[in-house]
Image (spheres, rainbow, N blue to C red):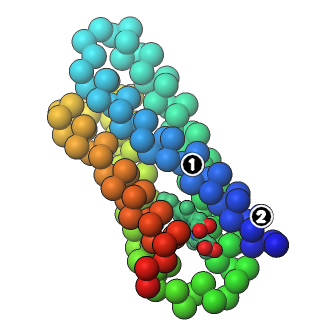
Amino acid sequence: MLTLWLKAFHVIGVVTWFAGLFYLPRLFVYHAEATEGVIRDRLKVMERRLLVMTHIGGALAIVFGIATLASEPFYLRAGWLHVKLVLVLLLVIYHGMLVKLTRDFATGRCTWSSRALRWFNEAPGVLLLVIVILAVVKPF
Ligand code: HEM
């Protein structure tokens, strides 16, 4: 029963985290293409606030994921979970890149093209697809 509660909050954290992982890089695309200062200033505020929500979602997903793991020792022997954790590490690295890009846009130092940012924006979708299949189907 406890595991189910922990898992519920884990999934709530994952959904919140992904709202930011999907939409923050999309804001960067608009930012890189914006020509008016007033629009860039508005985007800076939106990016800063969305980053805070992304931190909260990421922290909830990881804390409740680890708590779910700790509540049932047999998870530690599951092959799918080991692969999932490697992919979660990639998500954490991606999150770190969002922090850096938010800072660079805030100070006008971002050199990424909007095309590169559009490709960058695809990565969390691919990771989400694989991680959810691993967690739900548990193929190995
Ligand atoms: C440190 C990070 C994480 C840990 C330790 C962790 C651990 C776990 C554990 C132990 C379960 C329970 C599996 C089960 O009972 O079937 C679970 C479920 C789940 N996890 Fe994670 N997880 C983490 C991050 C993530 C991320 C980033 C995502 C999404 C991209 C995710 C998506 C899911 C989903 C959808 C379930 C529900 C599976 C089901 O009920 O069938 N997890 N996680």
Residue 138's x, y, as percent? 49, 77
Task: Locate residue 39: give its quadrant.
Answer: top left
User: Is residue 14 found left or right of 73 in the rendered image?
Assistant: left
Residue occupied by mark 1: 15
| Distance of label 2 from label 1 (alpha carbons) | 16 Å
Q: Are marks 2 and 1 in contact (CB under 8 Å)?
A: no
Task: Locate residue 89: give its quadrant.
Answer: bottom left
Q: Residue at x 44, y 45 (%)?
A: 21
Q: Can residue 7 be seen by looking at this rendering?
A: yes
Classed neighbour count for the residue bearing mark 1: other residues with Cα under 10 Å, few (<14), some (14–19), many (≥20): some
Residue 125's x, y, as percent? 37, 50
User: Is residue 38 found left or right of 132 in the rendered image?
Assistant: left
Q: Earlier in the sequence, mark 2 or mark 1?
A: 2
Q: Can residue 85 be seen by looking at this rendering?
A: no
Residue occupied by mark 2: 5
Q: Residue at x 68, y 65 (%)?
A: 7
Residue 88's x, y, as percent? 45, 65
Amino acid found under the numbered disc labelled 1: Val
* Numbered tag placed on residue 86 in the rendering: none
On screen, 139 above or below 38? Answer: below
Q: Determine whether the residue tagged by mark 2 lies in a helix, strand or loop.
A: helix
User: Is residue 83 found left or right of 78 in the rendered image?
Assistant: left
On screen, 88 above or below 14? Answer: below
Q: Residue at x 38, y 29 (%)?
A: 27
Q: Residue at x 77, y 64 (%)?
A: 5
Amino acid found under the numbered disc labelled 2: Trp
Q: Quadrant of the N terminus?
A: bottom right
Q: Determine whether the residue tagged by mark 1 lies in a helix, strand or loop.
A: helix
On screen, 72 above or below 12? Answer: below
Tally of numbered tags: 2
Q: Quadrant of the C terminus?
A: bottom left
